Image: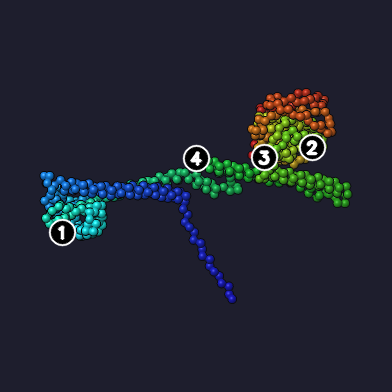
């Protein structure tokens, strides 16, 4: 059996209708429906008013006819029904679009002496027979409608009878209004209304087309910009004009492009930095392996040690990159309510385990704050390791309040950080190069991770010069909510005597707002020239000497 192929019908592509056209069509249709609703409502109301007015005029003429018949001749009754009918036909003043006729013996016998707008006898020859037939069955008729022979009349037919009248004993007076003629006025007005409505719709459509084009212009620019934007070019930005929702959307789009541009540049810089950082250890390992003498056991051992050292450096680099990447994830922090005093005690104890670290606890603010204790501990330990590497290992760790920010700081007694490097040291793969200190073998990601932890808490990291001697103060600043900053705050006294197991702190007594922080004396620390600084460590940095770099 040979295979059969079925042709799939190609889906017909619908024509593309722009938002501008759809918006204009929607506006025009809405206005047209509104005008139609108004026009129809007004027409119906006016038509009913006209019909009601015709019925009232018929009743007025009926009353006038009754008055003529009852008044008689000189106060005497009419001699015959025919004479009474003649008087009614002659005396009633005809209105516009009306006609009247007198009937007896089933025939039209009397008509007004002046021509009227409606000829009830000749315009509709069957009208008289119709009226005679209706009155024979129902008697007097008021407000009836005759819609035959191409006419639309509203009429009344009342018999006139005079007692003891010679034949004819009964005569019939008929008056009718031409409804079409009466409604012609509002029909003409309706025609003009339709013409004006059409002009209004054209004007609304034109104005809507122009206004919609101006309002949607930023959207077209967004589409064109999005078409030009690529991974190689994110420099395009939307022009912002005005303060409406569309301009706000343009601002949001520009902000998004800024973030994408920054992220792309950061990724490019990361790849470049990683490539540069890995090239050195790989080159070192390759060079020593190529020059190694496999017959010399000592050379083999030396090469092995060097290779393991370089591999450890690369492993540390990979771990630090993983830590940095986790801080860019969707949930970089696990915020919980933390007692800052207890957290700082734990951090100090952990820091004392760092090889080469001589740590003293500084003043600590006692409050409960929402933060990630693991990340804060990681940041402080990294600052302590940095102090051991570049500052000689003598450290003081503490915390304080600065306005609405919690500041956790690490003070070292090293050579300090040059002013032109205070921002750069927080960049990725930047290593300290203080005067007189060789470049360390670290990954160059430590302080960058500290900065990312601070920014993940919506805060910042910075370094300032110590004002009471050599060294630097590294500060992690974290904003606090209003409820935390306005709560009762006090500072825990710190027993600086050396001990292996810190004693419990004294109970805290709320003291309200604190303007000055008294730092208790600490034991002598070996410093330059054997001098022991006695002034308190400044907890409010000098603004003129503080730098705070925003991540690119």
Mark 4 and mark 1 in contact? Answer it, CB < 8 Å.
no
Mark 2 and mark 1 in contact? Answer it, CB < 8 Å.
no
Q: Earlier in the sequence, mark 2 or mark 1?
A: 1
Dot in front, 3 or 1:
1
Q: Image quadrant of residue 520?
A: top right
- The residue at which mark 2 appears reads as 350
Q: Where is residue 240 in the image (x, y as percent from the top left)?
A: 51, 40
- The residue at which mark 3 appears reads as 456
Distance, label 4 to label 2, CA atoms, is: 55 Å
Whether residue 527 is visible, yes or no, is: no
Q: Position of residue 315 (x, y in %)?
A: 77, 46
Distance, label 4 to label 3, CA atoms, is: 32 Å
**How many badges with numbers are in the image?**
4
Residue occupying image coordinates x 71% and y 32%: 367
251 horizontally vs 463: left or right: left
Mark 4 and mark 2 in contact? Answer it, CB < 8 Å.
no
């Amino acid at each position: 059996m040979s295979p059969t192929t079925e042709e799939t019908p190609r889906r017909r592509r619908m024509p593309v209708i722009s938002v501008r056209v759809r918006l204009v069509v929607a506006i025009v249709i809405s206005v047209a429906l509104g005008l139609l609703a108004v026009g129809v409502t007004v027409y119906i109301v006016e038509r009913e008013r006209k019909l009601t007015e015709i019925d009232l005029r018929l009743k007025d003429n009926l009353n006038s006819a009754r008055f003529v018949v009852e008044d008689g001749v000189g106060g005497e009754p009419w001699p015959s029904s025919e004479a009474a009918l003649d008087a009614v036909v002659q005396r009633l003043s005809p209105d516009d679009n009306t006609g009247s006729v007198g009937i007896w013996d089933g025939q039209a016998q009397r008509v007004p002496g002046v021509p009227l707008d409606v000829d009830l006898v000749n315009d509709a020859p069957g009208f008289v027979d119709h009226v005679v037939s209706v009155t024979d069955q129902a008697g007097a008729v008021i407000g009836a409608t005759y819609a035959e022979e191409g006419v639309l009349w509203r009429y009344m037919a009342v018999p006139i009878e005079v007692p003891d009248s010679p034949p004819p004993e009964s005569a019939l007076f008929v008056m009718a209004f031409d409804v079409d003629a009466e409604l012609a006025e509002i029909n003409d007005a309706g025609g003009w209304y339709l013409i004006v409505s059409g002009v209004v719709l054209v004007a609304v459509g034109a104005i809507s087309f122009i206004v919609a084009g101006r309002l949607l212009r930023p959207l077209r620019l967004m589409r064109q910009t999005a078409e030009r934007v690529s991974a190689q070019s994110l420099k395009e930005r939307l022009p912002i004009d005005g303060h409406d929702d569309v301009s706000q959307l343009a601002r949001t789009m520009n902000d998004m492009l800024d973030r994408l541009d920054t992220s792309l540049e950061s990724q490019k810089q990361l790849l470049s930095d990683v490539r540069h950082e890995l090239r050195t250890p790989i080159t070192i390992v390759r060079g020593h392996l190529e020059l190694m003498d496999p017959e010399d056991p000592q050379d083999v051992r030396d090469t092995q040690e060097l290779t393991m050292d370089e591999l450890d450096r690369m492993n540390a680099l990979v771990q630090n990159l993983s830590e940095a990447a986790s801080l860019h994830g969707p949930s970089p922090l696990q915020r919980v309510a933390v007692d800052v005093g207890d957290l700082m005690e734990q951090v100090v104890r952990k820091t004392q385990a760092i090889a080469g670290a001589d740590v003293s606890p500084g003043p600590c603010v006692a409050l409960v704050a929402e933060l990630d204790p693991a990340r804060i501990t990681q940041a402080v330990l990294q600052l302590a390791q940095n102090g051991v590497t570049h500052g000689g290992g003598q450290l003081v760790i503490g915390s304080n309040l600065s306005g609405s920010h919690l500041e956790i700081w690490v003070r070292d007694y090293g050579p300090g950080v040059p002013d032109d490097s205070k921002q750069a040291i927080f960049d990725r793969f930047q290593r300290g190069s203080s005067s007189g200190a060789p470049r360390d073998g670290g990954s160059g990601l430590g302080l960058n991770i500290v900065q990312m932890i601070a920014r993940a808490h919506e805060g910042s990291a910075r370094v300032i010069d110590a004002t009471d001697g050599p060294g630097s103060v590294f500060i992690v600043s974290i904003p606090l909510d209003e409820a935390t900053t306005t709560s009762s705050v006090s500072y825990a006294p710190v027993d600086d005597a050396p001990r292996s197991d810190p004693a419990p702190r004294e109970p805290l007594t709320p003291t309200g707002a604190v303007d000055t922080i008294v730092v208790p004396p600490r034991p002598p620390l070996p410093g330059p020239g054997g001098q022991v600084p006695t002034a308190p460590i400044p907890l409010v940095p000098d603004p003129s000497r503080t730098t705070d770099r925003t991540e690119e």
